[in-house]
Amino acid sequence: MAKDDEAASVAEPVDGRTARAVRTREAIVDATIALLAENDLRPSAPRIAERAGVSVRSVFQHFDDLETLYTAVGARVRDQVLPLILHIDPARPLEERIVDFVHQRAQVNEALTPTLRAAVVHAPGSRAINDQFQTGHDFVGTQVAQVFGPELELAGDRQVVFDALLTIASWSVWNSVRSLNRRSEAEAERLLVHMTASTLGPVVGRDLTGLVDVVEQAGSVPSADLSEAT
């Protein structure tokens, strides 16, 4: 019994230190994400520490360097956007799939924007960030192949159609439309619906470009409400 009590007394402070370490690490990641959201694309360790309410030393105790921290930030942001990514049945009508896929990508790309703008700044020379870029790119490619599989099977040049759809769905296109074209989220989403419909229309032998008008009337809503707009 004495040994059990001694083990418990040792375990409690160890568990407590572990819990505090986890909270500190999470606070540092949260602080970094908050600074990125405020368009601080190169947050320094002192600024991160101040926002997290910890010492600069704590930042480097939990993360060997800023690249390690950015890797943790990327993982956290990925976990935050995963609930936005829902399965889209390829057996559903093409028009519905286009609307739902574009709506989903619009939500995800908008949520990723603060982090990815910073990632672009730090990407040169950062293997970790470039690996995250590639992983995300490959994931969207898998989505495109799954959602529009039937149409890709019909395409005369599958690779060209696939690459076009993947490019349309990318964050870089979304960021260009939002930042350089200065379009609202709704306007950017309608443009991507038009681009996707223009790519897939010739594949199925139908003019799908009118779909953007339906989306505009419906207010850029998911296809669950599309029938009401039509």
Image (cartoon, grey):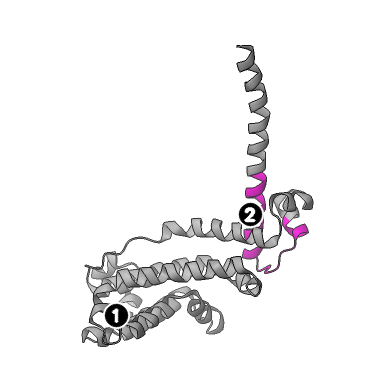
Crowd around label 2: few <14 · some 14–19 · many ≥20 (10 Å): many
Residue 114 visible in the displayed image: no
Q: Residue at x 78, y 53 (%)?
A: 56
Image quadrant in which you'd find residue 151 = bottom left
Name the quadrant containing residue 167. Answer: bottom left
Most common SS among magenta residues: helix
Q: Which residue is nearer to you in this view: 225 or 23? A: 23
Q: Nearer the viewer, mark 1 or mark 2?
A: 2
As drawn, the label of residue 211 is: 1
In this rendering, the count of numbered labels is 2
Tell me where the magenta segment starts and ends, as one range. 23-48
Q: Is residue 179 magenta?
A: no
Coordinates of residue 214 in the picture (x, y in percent): 30, 77
How many residues crowd around disc 1 within 10 Å: few (fewer than 14), some, or many (20 or more)?
A: many
Cα gap from disc 1 to disc 2, whole angstroms: 41 Å
Quarter of the rendering occupied by the N terminus? top right
Residue beneath disc 2:
29
